[in-house]
Every structure is written in C-alpha cells, then in structure tokens.
Image: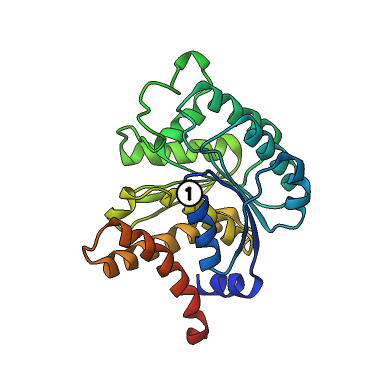
Amino acid sequence: MLNHLIKIKEKTPLIHCISNIVTANDCANLALAVNASPIMAQAPEEMNDIVSICDALVINTGTPSSDKYDACSRAAIAADAKKIPIILDPVGIGASKWRLENIRKLLSVSHPCIFRLNNSEAKILLSDDESDKGYSVSEHGVDAVPATSFDQSILYAQKLAQKYNCTVLISGVTDIIADSSRTQCISGGSSLTKQITGAGCMLSVLCGVFASVEKDAFTSACLASSFWKQCAKKADEITDGRGIGTYHIELINAAGNFINQIGEIK
C-alpha cells in the first residue's frame, strides 16, 4: 500500500465526485486529506468538460433527481470513452422502482470498473425480475441491509462481478471484494463506523483515488478497503469513548495523518 500512497501524494489526482447532498462535504474533505483534488460538479451541461480533465469518476446516486441521473449518464459515457475509471455507489437503489430503473439505464450505457455497495443493493442489482418487487420489501432507509449469511454475501459479490464484468466491494464488518476470478475478505476497522453517515460514500471516493494510480480495479478496491479499515481503527483508538462526533472527525484526521507520515517513512 505504501507505494500507492506515495503515488497518490505525488500525483494529486483530480477526482470527479457526483455525490449526494448528505455526504458531499465529507467526501470532498476526505479526498483532500489523502492529497487528491475533488471536484463536485453536478450540472449535466458540463459533464464532458469536467470528466475530460479528471483521473477518476465516482458516481454516488444518493438523493437523486432527474437532472442528477442525466449528469451521471453523461459523465459515465464520457469517462468510458476516455478510459477513465468509474466507481458506482448505487445508494438506496431499493428505495423506489424509479431509482432501480435509472441505475439500470445507467448500466446500459456505461461500464463501471468498481461497484461499492451493501448487501441489500447487491441483492437488488442481481434481480432481473421486475415482478420480484425486491426494491420495496425490506428497505427502512438507504443503508438497510437484510439479514444475510457471510457466505451469501460472498456469493452476491461474486455473481455481481460476473454479471457486470467488474470488481464488487460489499462493505460491512468484513468487506468483501470480488471480480470474475478473485475474492478477498478484509476485516478490522471499528464498530463505530456504522453509527455515522457517509462512511460508505467516503470509501467509494477512496476507491476512485486508488483507481487513479492503480489500473487493476480489484487491487484498487482492496487497497481502499484496507486503508479505510486502518483509518477506522486509528480513529477509534483516538476517540476513546468521546462520542460519535469525535470519531467522525478522527476518521478524516487518520486518513490525512497516514499521508502526512509518508515523507517520514521515505
């Protein structure tokens, strides 16, 4: 991982984040903390221009609108044409049929190299049966995850990777990363992570940051997962019972401190 962090520090990659209004600020600050340069453009009319100067595109479909889906499609098509890595975070895809339809439209015109999602979102993307109505049966908020065995989660990741010929990162207590031929499980982190909003969104941004310096999507996802778990562990240690607000801040501090220490390690 050290070599990749050095590359990120030296390159200062420009990451285009089509984020959601709940976590945009956290995503931008995390990118800055790891010495990436975030651009949070949303207007459909400027997607081609913005994508043309970026090193990675991170699409987060939380808090959606018709204009936002239009922007996502235009940006993804432009990124595919320029062979810029695309990370898709289909937040709350199960909240409505409209969201699911729009994500499927997006996937019909573009090819993300990494899907970063949870069990619930993976399960819904694997279903092609509209009559299943899996988009509405068990959602109680966009982060809802149905009770699933760990083996079942691994199967979701592997099947989704094969279906879309991509790398899949299902985040949780143990992250599962899979592509068409490889599977990796990464544990660690902190139980406090699930108590804050935006940890998954920030992980998606990290996938984009690592993908900007690593061509292999599977390796990029594994690096992002491992790095974020280390940040979570460090933030937990520093928080030491002082509350979720402190932990939230210390997550970003931990990411920045890892980068700042690179010069000393070298």
Q: Position of residue 125 (x, y in %)?
A: 51, 30
- Name the residue: 48% across, 86% down: 264
Displayed quadrant of residue 107? top right
- Residue 110: tell me if it is visible: no
Residue that extends furthest to the left in the rendered view of this protein: 241
Q: Position of residue 208 (x, y in %)?
A: 58, 55
The residue wearing badge 1 is 23
Displayed quadrant of residue 231? bottom left
Residues 106 and 196: in front is 196
Q: Position of residue 33 (x, y in %)?
A: 51, 67
- Name the residue: 54% across, 71% down: 5
The colour scheme used to paint the residues is rainbow
Task: Look at the picture and state if 147 lies above or below 25.
Answer: above
Please tell me how crowded label 1 is: few (under 14), some (14-19), or many (20+) other residues with Cα within 10 Å: some
Residues 201 and 150: in front is 201
Q: Position of residue 112 (x, y in %)?
A: 63, 43
Query: How many marks overall?
Result: 1
Residue that extends furthest to the top in the rendered view of this protein: 131
- Residue 248: tell me if it is visible: yes
Task: Look at the picture and state if 159 lies above or below 48.
Answer: above
Left or right placement of residue 10 versus residue 117 in this view: right
Left or right placement of residue 79 versus residue 154 in this view: right
Q: Amino acid at mark 1?
A: Thr
Left or right placement of residue 201 versus residue 236 in this view: right
- Name the residue: 44% across, 64% down: 227
- Name the residue: 47% across, 28% down: 124
Element type where label 1 sits in the image: loop
